[in-house]
Image (cartoon, grey):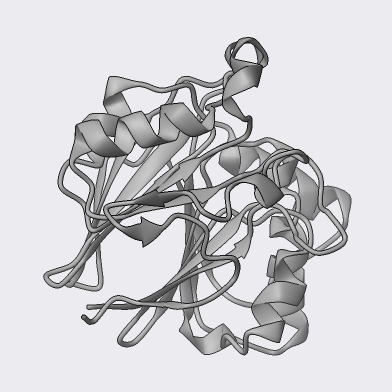
Amino acid sequence: MINTFQILGMSAGSPQLDQGVSSYMISCSNYDIMIDCGEGTYLEWLKHKYSWNKLRYIFITHLHPDHIGGLINLLFYKKLSNSNTPIIIYGPKRLKEYVDFNLIMQNINLSYSYKILTNPKFEKLNDDIFVESAIMKHSVKCLSYRFNALNFSIVIATDTLPTDNTVYLASNCDILVHECTFMNYNLEKAKQTYHSTLNDALYIAEKAKAKRLILSHFGNEIKNKIDNVSFNNQKCLINNNRINCNG
């Protein structure tokens, strides 16, 4: 069962004084799932009182620094905390190479068991959550994920141009979290950098028949311009508030 959803960081590219880069948390009955782990994620994770013993899964969308720059630090801090719970990390091709190289270069020997699985298409977590993935349109290999429970479904779609793969993955989901890196007047820049505009995100959410759209991955110009944007009569900006997924 999915209990809550929270954004730990929603800035695109580089952290801001009031907001970190990409990371999301899904809390289930007996464990937590982290999606992306950009720089500064650990401090936000700590601030919101998450537990090492419950963090069992990490899903990485792609290997750009604003999505993975905090992962090695997080794994190291878990070791320092003397937490021995195992962890499974999912992500695109070369994720294992990235993690192994950084651990070796920094002479970090993790004291707990961990496993890295690449290019997951369909996974079952602890008998109650099913995870699907789809390839996005980005400048590097990028995956988006759908987390299905009996009571709720959440899709994380970042970084990408608008694509039918997102529509298919997000079909009739309860929450679609979609990147919104640029305002509509920067459409050409969005295309050049393989990102989405506000209109792109709204279009994908409508086409997928998502029940709720939450916007994230904001460029510097965006956040203060979308306070009043809504979809299906619900605000698309939730900041760092936890969302209850139990009705």
Residue lying farthest front? 228
Q: Position of residue 173 (x, y in %)?
A: 21, 52
Q: Is residue 184 visible?
A: yes
In the rendered image, the vertical position of residue 156 relative to residue 43, given as above or below: above
Relative to 116, is 148 on the left or the right? left
Q: Quadrant of the N terminus?
A: bottom left
In the rendered image, the vertical position of residue 209 relative to residue 32, given as above or below: above
Q: Quadrant of the C terminus?
A: bottom left
Nearest the eye: 173 or 73? 173
Q: Is residue 109 visible?
A: no
Q: Position of residue 6 (x, y in %)?
A: 50, 70
Relative to 64, is 140 on the left or the right? left
Q: For the point 50% across and 38% down, which residue is it?
A: 158
Q: For the point 62% across and 89% down, which residue is it?
A: 49
Q: Position of residue 241 (x, y in %)?
A: 54, 75
Q: How many marks?
A: 0
On the image, which quarter does residue 187 sit in? top right
